[in-house]
Amino acid sequence: MIRNWLSRALSLLPFRTFDRYLIRNFIFAWVVCTFSVFGLFIVIDGVTRIEQFLKEEDPLPLVALRYFAALLPVYFSQYIGPVLTLLAAMFSVSSLNKGNELTPLRVSGLSFGRILGSYFLMGLVAAIAMVVVQELVVPSLRDEIRIAKAYGRSKTAIQPDMIVDTLDSMIEVDRYLPHERRGEDVVIVSRHSSNSSAKERIGAMEILWQEPVGGDPFWLLRDGTIQRWDESGAQIPNPDSEGESVYLQRFHEMRLATDMRPIDLESSDREIPYLSFSELRDQYKRRSHLKHLEVKLHQRFAFPLANLILLLLGLPFLLRTENRSIVVGIVLAIGVSSLYLITTYICADLGTKGQLPPMLAGWLPILFFGALGLTLFDGLES
C-alpha cells in the first residue's frame, strides 16, 4: 500500500520512470529503517528508564510519549539522520542487486553517477530536513527536551559549565532554571592580575536575572557572603551591617557586576544542541574566545552534508561486489557510519580543547571522507 501511494505521488514529479522507481524504493527503505532504528531505541531506552517514568504523577504512556516525542528530533538532526540515509540507500541498492535490476541500466550505457543520482538527490533532501528540524523544531522544544531528559530528577534545572566573563570573574552556577532565569548555589571568584591569587569570593544561594523597566538588565544575588584577600594572600576584613570588621561579610541582596547573560548559562557544550543557528551565532559574537561555540557553528553547516558523504563511501562497496545480501549492506552501512561519527566526535573534541583550529575541526571529516568517497566512486566508474 505504501509503495502504491508513493508511486502515485511521484508520478506527479518531472522525473524519468527509473528515477521515480529508485526514489520510491529509497523512501520505502528509509521509512522501514527509520521505524526499525527508532523502534529499537524506544524499546531499549524505555526499558532502562521505566523506573524513572513510574515515579512521575502522569500515566506511564503519557510520560513515555512526552519523553520520546521530545528527544527523537534531537537524535535525528544531530546523530542518526545521515545513518538513516545510508541505511536506506544500502537497503535499496542491495534489493536492486538481488533482482538484477541495475544490470539493464548499465547495459543501456548509463553511468553509475547517473543511475545513483536519485539517491544523492534524496540525500540532499534528508540534509535539508535535518537543517529544518535543527533550526525550527528543536529550539521550540528545548524546554520539553530538558524536562524529558530530567525525568526522575529536578524537572527544569540544567547544570551549566563554569562561565568566565570579560572581567575575568569565574562564575559557577550549580543549578539553573531557564524558565525562571534563576540559578541556585552560585560561586563567583575573581583573581589578582599580578599573581592570579584569589582576590574575592562571593557565594550566594540564588542568582536572578532582573529586567527593570527603563533600566539595564542585571543579575541579582541573594543570601550570600563575600570574602576578600590581598595580593599576599592575607584575608581582608570588611565592615558588616553594624560597622564591625568581619572576614566573612554577609548580604541579603547584591547586584553582580558582570556581562554574563542568561544565554551564557544555556550555551554550554551540553546545551548548545538546543540553540538555533542565529542564537548560536549571536552567542559566538559575544564569546568568541569559547572554542566549542565556533566548532559547533561550523558543524551546523558540515554535519548535514554527511548525508551525501556517507553515500559516497557506502555505495561503492556494494556496487563493486554486486552484493545481493541486504544484511551485508546494513552491516556495511553501520560500520561506515560509526567510523564517520567517531571521527566527527574526535575532531570536535580536539577543536574544543584548542588542539585543532575550530574550522578544521568542523570540516575535517567532510573533507577527508568526501575525498575518499569521490576516489572510491571514481574507481567504480572506471
Image (tube, rainbow, N blue to C red):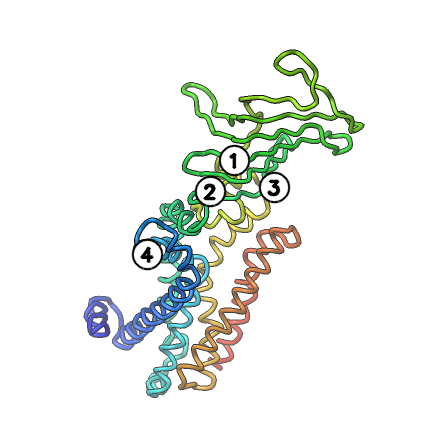
Q: Is residue 40 left or right of residue 169?
A: left
Q: Residues within 10 Å of mark 3 (few under 14, many from 20)?
A: few
Is disc 3 placed on a helix, strand or loop?
loop
Q: Position of residue 374 (x, y in %)?
A: 51, 71
Is disc 1 placed on a helix, strand or loop?
strand
Is disc 2 placed on a helix, strand or loop?
loop
Of tags 4 and 3, the one toward the viewer is 4
Q: Which residue is mark 2?
A: 157
How many numbered markers are drawn?
4
Q: Which residue is mark 1?
A: 184
Q: CA distance from mark 1 to mark 4?
A: 31 Å
Q: CA distance from mark 3 to mark 2?
A: 26 Å
* Amino acid at the residue labelled 3: His
Q: CA distance from mark 2 to mark 1?
A: 10 Å
From the viewer's side, name the closer residue of 229 and 138.
Answer: 229
Q: Sequence-wise, which precedes: disc 1 or disc 3?
A: 1
Q: Which residue is mark 3?
A: 289
Q: Sequence-wise, which precedes: disc 1 or disc 4?
A: 4
